[in-house]
Image (cartoon, helix red, strand yellow):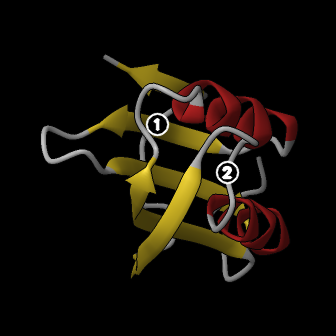
Amino acid sequence: MADTDSRTRTIHALVSGRVQGVGFRFHCAQEAQGLGLVGEVRNLPDGDVEVLAQGPADDVARLVAWLYHGPDWASVTGVRLTERRAGSLRARRFDISY
């Protein structure tokens, strides 16, 4: 991952729709890891999936674009995206939280 500078982007996303029980977290983690991002993805009790991701701005943008459709079995109906302070995550890798 790039150093925490103006090229680093940190996002918090809430993904809604049919996103639990369809491999969304697994595939999101694969996408993020392939892009060299750090952070986590987890299911929320309300049926949404929460994603925290940090890395080079272009790679974070690629993950965000992926969130709008997810894996083939998902049906994403919305993504609520919030920018966080660059470098605010202290993660060393991208994990699935249970």
In percent of the image, x 64 and y 68: which residue is there?
A: 68
Tell me the residue that label 2 is attached to. Answer: 70
Residue 4, how many percent across, how many down?
62, 63
Query: Is residue 75 depicted above or below 79 in this figure?
Result: above
Q: Residues within 10 Å of mark 2 (few under 14, many from 20)?
A: many
In percent of the image, x 75 and y 29: which residue is there?
A: 30
In percent of the image, x 69 and y 61: which residue is there?
A: 69
Could you tell me the amino acid type at mark 2?
A: Gly
Could you tell me the amino acid type at mark 1?
A: Glu
Residue 67 can be seen, yes or no: yes
Residue 54, how many percent across, how many down?
58, 56
Q: Residues within 10 Å of mark 1 (few under 14, many from 20)?
A: many
Instruction: Calculate the distance from the C-alpha at mark 2 to the C-alpha at mark 1.
Output: 15 Å
2 or 1: mark nearer the eye:
2
Query: Is residue 34 depicted above or below 81 in this figure?
Result: above
Residue farthest to the top, as pictured = 98
Left or right, 88 with respect to 7, comes to: left
Left or right, 96 with respect to 30, comes to: left
- Tags 2 and 1 touching, CB below 8 Å: no
Q: Quadrant of residue 43?
A: top left
Which is nearer the eye, 42 or 76? 76
Any mark on residue 40, and which? 1
Which is nearer the eye, 25 or 75? 75
